Image: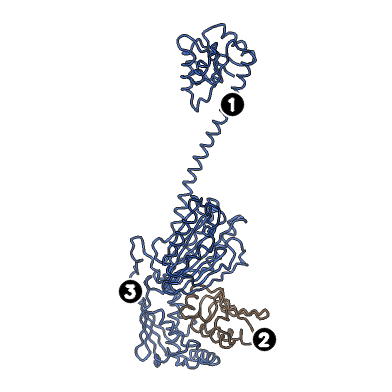
Chain colours: A blue, B brown
């Protein structure tokens, strides 16, 4: 060890140097305080032995200056006073100046050596602590930096939320920076609303990681207009392969149709959901029927989902178990009972009422798990864009397409499908592809079967007749040699943007006013009823030989 | 190619429709439920591989319901794609059949 010996008496210095060198230390000497400070600045020492009374600068002042120079980087150097003074006041002055210890002169050699050893040990420990602290600070700042990055990614990833849809209200309260609960919403291609609420095992960053792939895929699945059961299936497959065995995600997935009068839902492992009547009372309890996501293998996974109808003013309320398991300062749980208490006639703002009772119950108790509450309201879905306006309607070019089919074309396997390949490729029509396909198929088969082939729906009254009808269709179609079906498609502005479809046939016409009248349980007459439900306008002319319909392709008014 | 397959296990009968569910399947679909033995049969129509339905398919399903004298909701339609689901709900079929 390097030791600095400070004393104005050469003899004292010589004795100390001799003693210390004998023990294998390296010693440097200073005559007075000033030299000591200088030596300290120029070189590194492990310990300083300091006389008190010296010319030029005394030991107290030198100690003050040296201690002032010490910083974290230079490390801790203990200073032991060697002094002939023995009154308490003098000794306490030594300590006040920053000295670490003192030894009265004349000193005992064994005691001196013991003190030096002890202080060197303290110095080692101090250095060790300083290094550990430095490392800790380094880790901490690295963690802080990484946390910032991850936080940024999460913020971006979870931006997939509609903040601007009246149908959806929510309260999301993570227990820490990173949320293991996940709430997503997206418009459905038919103008409705998808909502996903998930709760990953645990909370914090670990639980939060699983939310990323879900959030990333959700929009795509919604755009494909998958059923809630299929979305669950896709997520389950992803999470099963991604998450460690002990982690999974309890979830509720819901689709509200654009009219807002029915929901399809899939629930796996989350607490019961509730349908709240317009007056605020409980109408129905929806129970989870599935395992959470990330547990079952594909072959055991059920894509099944449930359908419920919502009346005006009704709401669906669901939440993650952070709510019923929220604890009061005494450690008591909030419980489902306290949630259900808020479902009573007269409570208009159910979500608000539950939050209020939750806050009153929990007081200042620490929140232990992430909490998410969601309310989906019935009524037409309006999703506003950033500027707070309705989503823009049709912004494509106006266009028109015509198709004139002769007998040979009509005999082809599936002329409607071929037409749909063209129509369905139009970007703005793509979301309605299936309904337009159905619409066109119905219009076409009416024109062909009733108009050109002269078949009567009456035949379809019995099951045998139903079969005969289609046998006749086959025979007459094969025998057909002269017929025309003329189709026109056009984008028009009529009560919003519509696709106008006009179909004319060369047949005998038919009693179109009769055909629509059939019983709900009858196996015929369904086609026209379908058309009526999806079109704004439907008009026969020319004795049933011509039919024109307007199908709305405006998001806000679509089915 | 479209086709109809039937799988009977005791009282449970599953009829799966592959491809397009339209009038071309008329006879096949009828054969699938009309000639089964056993009483109190529980029917499920599995549409997981069905790409398309038209109103004649709706008619066929109602024929089936009448033929087997099933109560509303007694026949299950399973794995229905949302595009088809939309057609069923336009036709109010969700009141006549159980969807799962």
In the rendering, at what x and y percent does residue A243 appear?
58, 56
Quarter that holds the N terminus of chain A? top right
In whole angstroms, how far apart are the C-alphas of marks 1 and 3?
82 Å
In the rendering, at what x and y percent does residue A169 appear?
43, 63
Q: Residue at x 46, y 22 (%)?
A: A68
Residue A92's place in the image compared with A8, above or below, is below
Label 1 SS: helix
Mark closest to the chain's N terminus, 1 or 3: 1
Label 3 SS: loop
**Label annotation for residue A124:** 1
Q: Chain of mark 3?
A: A
In the rendering, at what x and y percent does residue A176 appear?
50, 50
Residue B90's place in the image compared with A96, above or below, is below
Q: Chain of mark 1?
A: A
**Label annotation for residue A386:** none
Q: Is residue A159 left or right of residue A292?
A: left
Label 1 crowding class (10 Å Cα cut-off): few <14, some 14-19, many 20+? some
**Is residue A369 shown to the viewer in this render?**
yes
Q: Nearer the viewer, mark 1 or mark 2?
A: 1
In whole angstroms, how far apart are the C-alphas of marks 2 and 3?
54 Å
Q: Can marks 1 and 3 be said to lie on one chain?
A: yes
Q: Is residue A163 left or right of residue A332?
A: left
Residue wearing tag 3: A496
In the depicted view, which residue is nearer to us: A466 or A339? A339
Label 2 SS: loop
Residue wearing tag 2: B37
Q: Nearer the viewer, mark 1 or mark 3?
A: 1
**Is residue A431 shown to the viewer in this render?**
no
In the depicted view, which residue is nearer to us: A46 or B53? A46
């Amino acid at each position: 060890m390097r030791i600095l010996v400070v004393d104005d008496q050469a003899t004292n210095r010589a004795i100390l140097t001799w003693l210390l060198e004998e023990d294998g230390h390296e010693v440097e000497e200073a005559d007075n305080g000033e030299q000591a400070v200088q030596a300290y600045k120029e070189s590194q020492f492990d310990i300083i032995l300091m006389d008190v009374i010296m010319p030029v600068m005394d030991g107290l002042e030198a100690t003050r200056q040296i201690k002032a120079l010490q910083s974290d980087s230079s490390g801790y150097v203990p200073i032991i006073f060697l002094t002939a003074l023995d009154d308490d006041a003098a000794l306490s002055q030594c300590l006040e100046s920053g000295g670490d210890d003192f030894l009265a002169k004349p000193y005992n050699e064994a005691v001196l050596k013991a003190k030096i050893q002890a202080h060197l040990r303290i110095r080692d420990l101090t250095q060790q602590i300083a290094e550990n602290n430095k490392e800790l600070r380094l880790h901490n700042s690295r963690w802080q930096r990484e946390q910032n990055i991850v936080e940024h990614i999460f913020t971006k990833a979870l931006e997939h939320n509609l903040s601007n849809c009246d149908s959806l209200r929510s309260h999301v309260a993570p227990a820490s920076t990173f949320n293991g609960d996940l709430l997503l919403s997206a418009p459905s291609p038919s103008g409705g609303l998808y909502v996903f609420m998930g709760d990953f095992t645990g909370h914090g960053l670990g639980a939060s990681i699983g939310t990323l792939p879900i959030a990333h895929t959700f929009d795509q699945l919604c755009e494909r207009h998958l059923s809630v059961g299929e979305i669950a299936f896709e997520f389950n497959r992803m999470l099963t392969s991604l998450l460690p065995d002990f982690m999974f995600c309890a979830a509720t997935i819901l689709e509200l149709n654009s009219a807002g009068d029915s929901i399809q839902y899939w629930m796996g492992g989350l607490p019961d959901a509730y349908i709240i009547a317009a007056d605020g009372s409980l109408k129905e309890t929806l129970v989870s029927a599935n395992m959470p996501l990330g547990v079952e293998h594909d072959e055991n996974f059920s894509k099944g989902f449930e359908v419920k109808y919502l009346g005006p003013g009704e709401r669906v309320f669901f939440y993650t178990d952070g709510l019923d398991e929220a604890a009061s300062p005494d450690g008591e749980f909030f419980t489902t009972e306290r949630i259900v208490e808020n479902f009573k006639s007269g409570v208009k703002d159910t979500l608000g009422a539950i939050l209020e009772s939750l806050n009153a119950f929990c007081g200042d108790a620490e929140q232990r798990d992430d909490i998410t509450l969601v309310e989906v309201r019935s009524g037409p879905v309006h999703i506003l864009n950033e500027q707070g306006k309705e989503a823009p309607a049709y912004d494509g070019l106006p266009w028109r397409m015509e198709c004139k089919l002769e007998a040979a074309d009509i005999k082809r396997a599936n002329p409607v499908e071929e037409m749909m390949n063209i129509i369905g490729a139009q970007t703005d029509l793509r979301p309605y592809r299936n309904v337009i396909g159905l619409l066109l198929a119905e219009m076409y088969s009416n024109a062909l079967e009733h108009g050109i082939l002269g078949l009567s729906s009456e035949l379809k009254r019995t099951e045998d007749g139903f079969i005969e009808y289609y046998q006749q269709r086959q025979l007459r179609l094969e025998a057909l040699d002269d017929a025309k079906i003329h189709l026109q498609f056009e984008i028009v502005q009529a009560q919003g943007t519509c696709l106008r479809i006009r179909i004319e046939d060369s047949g005998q016409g038919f009693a179109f006013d009769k055909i629509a009248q059939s019983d709900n349980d009858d196996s015929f007459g369904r086609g026209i009823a379908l058309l009526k439900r999806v079109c704004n306008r439907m008009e026969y002319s020319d004795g049933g030989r011509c039919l024109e319909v307007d199908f709305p392709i405006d998001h806000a008014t679509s089915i | 190619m479209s086709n109809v397959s039937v799988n009977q296990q005791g009282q449970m009968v599953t009829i799966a429709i592959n491809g397009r569910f339209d009038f071309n399947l008329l006879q096949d679909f009828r054969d699938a439920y009309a000639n089964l033995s056993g009483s109190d049969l529980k029917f499920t129509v599995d549409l997981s591989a069905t790409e398309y339905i038209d109103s004649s398919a709706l008619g066929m399903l109602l024929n089936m319901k009448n033929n087997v004298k099933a109560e509303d909701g007694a026949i299950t339609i399973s794995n229905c794609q949302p595009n088809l689901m939309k057609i069923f709900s336009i036709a109010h079929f969700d009141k006549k059949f159980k969807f799962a």
